Amino acid sequence: MSARDGMNGTGANGQVEMDSDHFSPYRPDGKLYGFVCVVTGATHPVGMAITLELAACDVASSEDYTSLAAEINKAHPNTKVIGYPYKFANEEDTLTLIDDVLNAWGRLDVWVTSSGLLGPPSIEETSPDDLQKCFEANSMAPFFALKYAPPAMAKTTSKGNYPNAAPKGQKYGSIVVVSSVAGTYGGCWGPCFTMSSHAALGVVRAGVATLKGTGMRINCISPGQIDVGVDLQGFDMRGLSSQLPPASLQSEKAQREHIGLERAGLPQEVGRVAGFLASGFSSYITGANLVVDGGASVMNPLTVPI
């Protein structure tokens, strides 16, 4: 998290105090300031929106980054985006990534897993291999983040030599798991996605006790119908290469009937929630599941399936 991580200290009277020099979480323009972050799935629309929201961070790691890095560096010259090709559900690759981040930057502050897979739409089309792939992407990646990121996040450091750098004198870390409303309800999408999304939310809930006493937090974002801009003519209905179902699979009439805000969400609306959870503005939130679905699950838990 570099410069400003929103971490609180405790005074002699036990009251929480804010270190205003190094732990003010936002710059005047509303962006996160000086954090060192990892974002997986940054080539997906939602992952890209999250990376753009964290654009004041000093490093964002993704699988394929050339155009994303160019876009961010143009808008935010002090931001450094480094692409890191690794298997997000692989233990060895995760550890190597963490080591490289610490060697390069001396700190790690935010880890966002946004690399989910949709899976086949029906149980008849679902093979054991399909299920395995979805569990790896949707729940194993959060598991590795929970297991290995906190020790790196606990490392403090003096001021680095990169733009926006500042000392990290207190332990701080925020893990954000991007899952789906399918992690709470059954029947929203296909069985693979539902099962593995439930497991992802389980990682978050188990993580609260796991992180107790460390100063680290873990939270979940559960998007509903998000307009990911997928061309249906080229869309793989099995969904193994897609993060979320395209909103165009629902008609405008269906969206008006089943979504409280009568429209699909936008990737940047998920990104803003991730920015909030990454920052010190959410310093007393852990184990939460923030549903970003325009009120659809409140009106009707069974969102119109694919």
Image: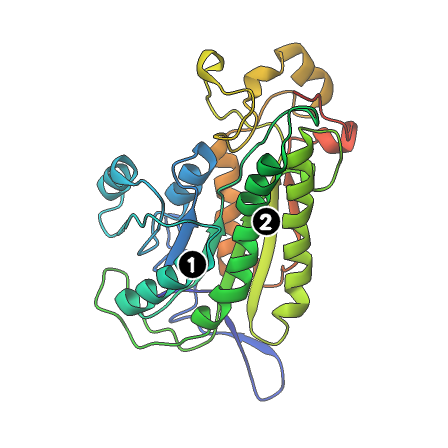
Return the residue found at the far front: 128
What x and y, as percent, mark residue 236?
50, 20
Residue located beneath label 2 in the image: 139
Quadrant, the C terminus: top right
Inspect this view and state whether residue 8 appears: yes
Left or right side of 158 for 53: right
Few, some or many C-alpha atoms within 10 Å of disc 1 (few <14, some 14-19, many ≥20)?
A: some
* Amino acid type shown at disc 1: Thr
* Amino acid type shown at disc 2: Ser
Residue pictured at 54% horizontal, 22% vertical? 246
What x and y, as percent, mark residue 99?
35, 67
Left or right side of 30 for 248: right
Badge 1 or badge 2: first in the primary sequence: 1
Residue pictured at 40% horizontal, 38% vertical? 48
Tell me: residue 1, above or below residue 235. below
The one nearer the camera, 164 or 115, is 115
- Give me the disc on residue 94: 1
Question: Cα distance, mark 1 to mark 2?
Answer: 14 Å
Residue pictured at 26% horizontal, 42% vertical? 69
